[in-house]
Every structure is written in C-alpha cells, then in structure tokens.
Image (tube, rainbow, N blue to C red):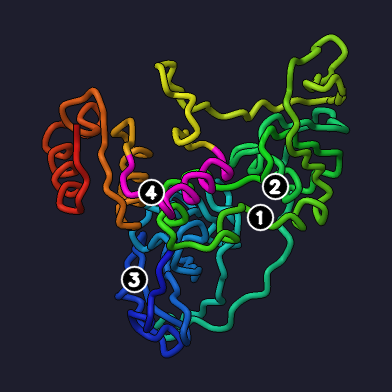
C-alpha cells in the first residue's frame, strides 16, 4: 500500500530549471504546487508526468525509460510519456501530464493537461470477434477485459469467475489487508459499478466444467452453456494443498481468495499462535502480517534457509534474521 509522501521534494518546476540540469536521457524529480512531477528528456523533447506509479506508488524517477515509455522499478508497470496512459499491467490508471515550455535555456512546467480518450491501436485487418469469453476472475482476466474496453472493443465481454468476489489484486491478500493496515474497499481492482458501466458481464460463482471447442461453447458445472467467438483462459494457479491427516480441519486454511483471507483474519482475532507451512514469498508475507497482529508465528519448511534457492544463501540468511528479529520462529 502506497504511503503518503508529505511535502513535495525537488525544485519548483513552475519557476523553471536550467536545461543543463536535465541532460538528454535524464530524469529529474520536482513539483508543481503540491504534486510531484517527473521530467524526462529525450533529445529535443521534454515530458512532464506524475512521479509515482498508479499501482502502488513506486518512484518512477528510479524507473527505466525505454523509447517514449517509463517502467516502474517495483512491478514493471509501463506508462506512455506523451499521454500518461498505462500501457501494461499491473497499473490500470493513467498518469497525469503537464505542458512543458523551453525558454532561454530554461525548462518551465505549465498547466496540467486535460485527459483525452486513448486512441485505439492498430489491431490488424482480421475480423473482430463479436463475443469474447474470459475464463478466470483474477488480475489477468480483469486486465484483459479492461484493456479491451480501453482499446474501444465494442463487442460482448463475458468474465466467468469461480470466486464469490469481483477481481482483486491477490498479492494484497498476504500483505497490508491481512495485517489489518488496509481497508477492505482497497482490495478490489475496481468497484462493482465498473463492470456495468463498461458493459462487462462478470459472472461470479461460475464453475467451468469443460470447453466444447466444436460448438464454441464453455460448459458450466450446472450445465449452462456460454457461446464464444474468442476464448481467453486466465485461470491462474491453485495453491498446493496438503493431503496429510488433519489438513481438512476447520482451523487449517489456504490463502488464495478474498474469502480465504477474511477467514484467516477472523481466526486471527482470537488466535494466540499460527503455523505457516512454506517459507517462500507468500508464506513469509503471511508470517509478517500475522506478527503485526501480535500472534506467535512459526514457519515450517523443508529448506535450511527461506528462499535460498531463489535468493542464494547470503540473502536467505538476511531474510531469516530479519524475520527472527520480528519474532518469527523457523523450523
């Protein structure tokens, strides 16, 4: 969850800066009023855009400029320097843009530009499908539906999700919300009104049983059929579930859905001790979140060090010590 940045930093760009302070290919962080603004120079062109990623507030001044785009250093969201448009997930909201003027070897940032509707990109000369069905209600399925509408696709979009909640950003479920530091309305990728406003037929609790490729239909578990012209499978991954004795008891949880997270939170309100099975990213995030609730946390994993295979022994030792300093016990 992005933190507030307080008083804006860097030079006042309304008052202007010297052109020499922004070399070709360079980036400079400043402000216009109370808003942080990032200046980017590419040859004779200078762009002024919002300085923080619209996904989680990553500092774009530390990002990578590639042609006329900037990439967030945290999760690699990509934005158009000319329009501020979010070109790649995980960001969906655009950046603000300001007008820029160069006078007497100085750069001045002017008014914030009004946003215009994104122009549809050239999709080729192929026939446009009348109906697209997306199987999956996670971030990938949502990104596909949202991008189709943003690119002015006028056909029918149906999203089939076996979840009971609209699409959420699943990584949040093991972080701030689980720790009790983020509100519930922060978790959905968009409010429910987004789907009706954009004519996206989101069907929840829809279990897909099979695909009839011959008739171009998706068959649901209740026998209902949904026809399609084009089909996108965006089902994501399932958590590894234990098959050992006792794994089906009511106080044993997996973390995949919004409902799973809510069930863990409800249990955490009265729990004194939690055991987390697995010492990778999600397991360690859950351990940290539960420790912030002052619950005794034990992490059980087959490895000698957490995430050693991914990070190497030195980083793995650092991660383990960091968690141990915060009260996590490893087994």
Residue 118 percent location from the top left of the image? 71, 57
Residue 82, label in figure: none
Say whether residue 165 is magenta. Answer: no
> Is residue 172 at least partly visible in the picture?
no
Say whether residue 264 is magenta. Answer: yes
In three-dimensional space, the C-alpha distance between marks 2 and 1, rounded to whole angstroms, equals 10 Å
Which of the two discs, 4 and 1, sits closer to the camera?
4
Which of the two discs, 4 and 2, sits closer to the camera?
4
Quarter-of-image position of residue 321: top left
Residue 190, label in figure: 1
Residue extending farthest to the bottom is 15
Q: Is residue 209 above or below residue 190?
A: above
Q: In this figure, which residue is indicated by the disc labeled 4?
A: 271
Q: Residue at x 70, y 27 (%)?
A: 232
* Start-end of magenta stretch: 257-274
Q: Residue at x 66, y 43 (%)?
A: 142
Considering only order in the chain, which callout, 3 or 4, is on the residue closer to the N terminus?
Answer: 3
Q: Nearer the viewer, residue 284 or 141?
A: 284
Q: Is residue 60 above or below residue 16?
A: above
Instruction: For label 1, count other residues whose C-alpha is less than 10 Å away and answer few (under 14), some (14-19) or many (20+).
Output: some
Considering only order in the chain, which callout, 3 or 2, is on the residue closer to the N terminus?
Answer: 3
Please report contact status of discs 4 and 3: CB closer than 8 Å, yes or no. no
Question: Going by the image, does 151 lie left or right of 17?
Answer: right
Residue 22, label in figure: 3
Q: In this figure, which residue is indicated by the disc labeled 2?
A: 146
Which of the two discs, 3 and 1, sits closer to the camera?
1
In three-dimensional space, the C-alpha distance between marks 4 and 2, rounded to whole angstroms, equals 40 Å
Identify the secondary structure beneath mark 3. loop
Instruction: For label 3, count other residues whose C-alpha is less than 10 Å away and answer few (under 14), some (14-19) or many (20+).
Output: some
| Dominant SS type (magenta) | helix
Question: Going by the image, does 267 lie left or right of 281?
Answer: right
């Amino acid at each position: 969850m992005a933190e507030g940045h307080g008083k804006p930093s860097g030079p006042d760009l309304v008052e202007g800066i010297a052109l020499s302070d922004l070399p070709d290919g360079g980036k400079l962080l400043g402000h216009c009023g109370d808003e942080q603004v990032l200046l980017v120079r590419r040859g004779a062109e200078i762009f002024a855009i919002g300085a923080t990623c619209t996904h989680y507030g990553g500092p774009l001044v530390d990002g990578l400029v590639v042609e006329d785009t900037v990439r967030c250093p945290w999760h690699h969201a990509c934005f158009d320097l000319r329009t501020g448009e979010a070109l790649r997930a995980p960001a969906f909201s655009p950046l603000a843009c300001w007008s820029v003027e160069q006078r007497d070897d100085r750069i001045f940032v002017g008014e914030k530009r009004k946003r215009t509707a994104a122009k549809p990109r050239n999709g080729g000369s192929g026939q446009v499908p009348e109906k697209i069905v997306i199987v999956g209600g996670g971030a990938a399925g949502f990104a596909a539906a949202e991008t189709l509408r943003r690119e002015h696709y006028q056909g029918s979009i149906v999203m089939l999700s076996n979840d009971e909640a609209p699409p959420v950003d699943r990584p949040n479920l093991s972080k701030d919300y689980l720790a009790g530091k983020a509100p519930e309305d922060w978790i959905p990728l968009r409010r429910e009104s987004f789907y009706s406003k954009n004519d996206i037929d989101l069907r929840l609790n829809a279990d897909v049983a099979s695909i009839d490729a011959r008739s171009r239909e998706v068959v649901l578990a209740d026998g209902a059929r949904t026809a399609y012209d084009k089909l996108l499978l965006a089902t994501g991954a399932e958590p590894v579930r234990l098959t050992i004795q006792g794994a089906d008891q009511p106080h044993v949880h997996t973390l995949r859905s919004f409902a799973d997270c809510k069930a863990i939170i409800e249990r955490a309100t009265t729990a004194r001790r939690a055991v987390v099975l697995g010492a990778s990213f999600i397991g360690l995030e859950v351990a940290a979140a539960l420790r912030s609730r002052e619950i005794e946390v034990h992490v059980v994993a087959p490895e000698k060090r957490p995430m050693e295979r991914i990070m190497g022994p030195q980083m793995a030792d650092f991660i383990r010590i960091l968690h141990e300093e915060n009260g996590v016990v490893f087994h």
